[in-house]
Image (cartoon, grey):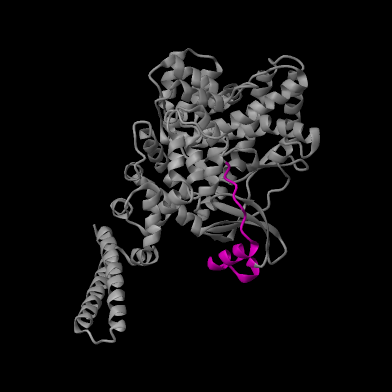
Amino acid sequence: MAFLRLVTSSLETAGHGIATGATALADEVARGRVPELQHARQDQERRMHAAARNVDRNAHVVGGDLGRVLRTVSVSEVGRVLGTVGVSVSVLAKIVTHPDELRRLMELVETHDFPGLVGALRQGARFPDNFFPEWIRRAGGYFPKFAQVLSVRADLIRSREVLEQFGRCLEDMPPRPEQQVRDHLLAQNWDTNVCEGVGAVLNSGTVAQVNSLTLPDGHPAVVKVSWPDTKRQMQTDFRLFRHAQDILRALRLEDEKATVVGALFAAVSKAEAAVMREFDLLAEAHVLQQIGEVIANEWPAAHQRWLSAAMVALAALPQPLPILAVAFIQRAQATGWRVQVPEPEPVLCSQAAFAMSVATGESLHRLLSGNQGDAGRQEAAQVLIGLIVPFIGWLLLCKSTSSFAHVDPHPGNFRWDTASSTLWVLDWGSHVVLSDERRRALCMLVTLLACDADDDSIADVARSVGVGSNVNHELAQVMRGMLNATSSHAAREAINMAAVDGILEDVADDVVPVMRCLAVLGGILKELQRSIRDQHQQDVPLSLASLWAPLADMGLQT
């Protein structure tokens, strides 16, 4: 292997350099009076230059970058790896053939205690309460996505605690300065006058950052940028952990309990295309344009159909909930609740940045947290039940084949403008397109769960959706748990319990984002039901399957 030859020739050069230095020193001390020392000095210099030429030749084969890396990675740095895990660089060189991957692996082992992560992922391991959120935030790179993807993989992770901690791993990251945003936009060939309008940061995640922007004509907007160095870091991590099993073996971290860890990295590697797509902001701008037209043309009629059906379903709840439910449905019908997405500025869209219109109103997260008092919290709850839940369901069940479905419905991705009765849906980087077969199977699953069908029927359709288990009763119970929420249990608890009981045997890769979406919505509904219980002393289940049943019927007709 060229890389291994390069390592060998580099170390050989270093050895000859040391020997040359020693003979040169001895020759200087002897003041050139010992011919043997002069010949030895000249011989060592020739050997050192020959070895250096071998470095250059091998570096040319592997790539100029790698040659530079080996010139910058000192013997002491390589020694730190040896000293930490007892593995020689020549062994790692057989696996890690890219300079950035080598540096990253050394960083993970030395700085972030990668063996500690592997140990915590082993079945039966014990770890501190906040181990995974803290480790993943420190390591950065693709590890926040690692947690996101695996947080619903009860078929791979049999630990309720691990899944629960992965579910708490946040993607928010420290923001970068305004000047760095301006420099980034200039590098994207944006006009200087536009770049000067960059203002305060509004949101900062693992992939992108959003800042306020004042356009040259004074018009307010926002700008979203994705960072090239973050993209390179994620690409490096994805490349690196394609060899996860070999890395674990080389680092002597593989045993019977750690076998599943390699499978976890393999599962995450399948999400590479979807994760890296989030960096393509030109594509996201296109999604916004297309979905904006779909929403404007089709959503109002679909929402009215859902509201009519929901009024009948909610009327069956215990009093006084039907009165409250009917009141907010009538309000929604009268005021004409709207859904909007930001509109991209056509001339300000590039691969790693785009400007768009301002989403007005207040973050739903802040409203639900009580930022606007009890009145704001109550209005946010109504918007959640009467608008967000049906909108996300409509996308998944009716539009995910012909258009796009938003699958990251956490409260921070929504803004509610009370004055205009408008819901703004943000961050369309996380979206899915499902096959017609998968979408229709999901519709049928919702329909069966809403009418409390038998276990065998539910389990058969669940397998068509992409969730597998050999035991029909247990699989049906997991599906019921995922699409029905109470004040104490929702989708997240269903997934976690499936891990404890070892129920799920397989989850299709394209369904993982859908399961995450269900877990997020289920968690919000659970908190909402706690609020209902506290206010009205009634523990009323909010069935996502029942709320989505009219939409599933629409989806089966398309």
Q: Is residue 397 visible?
A: no
Magenta highlight on residue 189: yes
Q: Give the image quarter of residue 114.
A: top left
Q: Which residues are magenta?
A: 170-195
Magenta highlight on residue 190: yes
User: Horizontal and vertical percent for residue 238?
Assistant: 41, 48
Q: Residue at x 29, y 51 (%)?
A: 91
Q: Give the image quarter of residue 376.
A: top right
Residue with the most extreme top position: 454
Is residue 247 found left or right of 317 in the rendered image? left
User: Horizontal and vertical percent for residue 171?
Assistant: 57, 45
Is residue 61 found left or right of 476 in the rendered image? left
User: Horizontal and vertical percent for residue 389?
Assistant: 62, 31
How many numbered marks have been drawn onto this rendered protein structure?
0
Quadrant the N terminus occupies: bottom left
User: Horizontal and vertical percent for residue 395?
Assistant: 55, 36
Q: Measured along the vertical axis of the image, is residue 157 above or below residue 226?
A: above
Q: Measured along the vertical axis of the image, is residue 539 above or below residue 177?
A: above
Q: Measured along the vertical axis of the image, is residue 76 above or below residue 333?
A: below
Q: Is residue 21 visible?
A: yes
Camera-side residue of 255 and 423: 255
Q: Residue at x 45, y 35 (%)?
A: 121
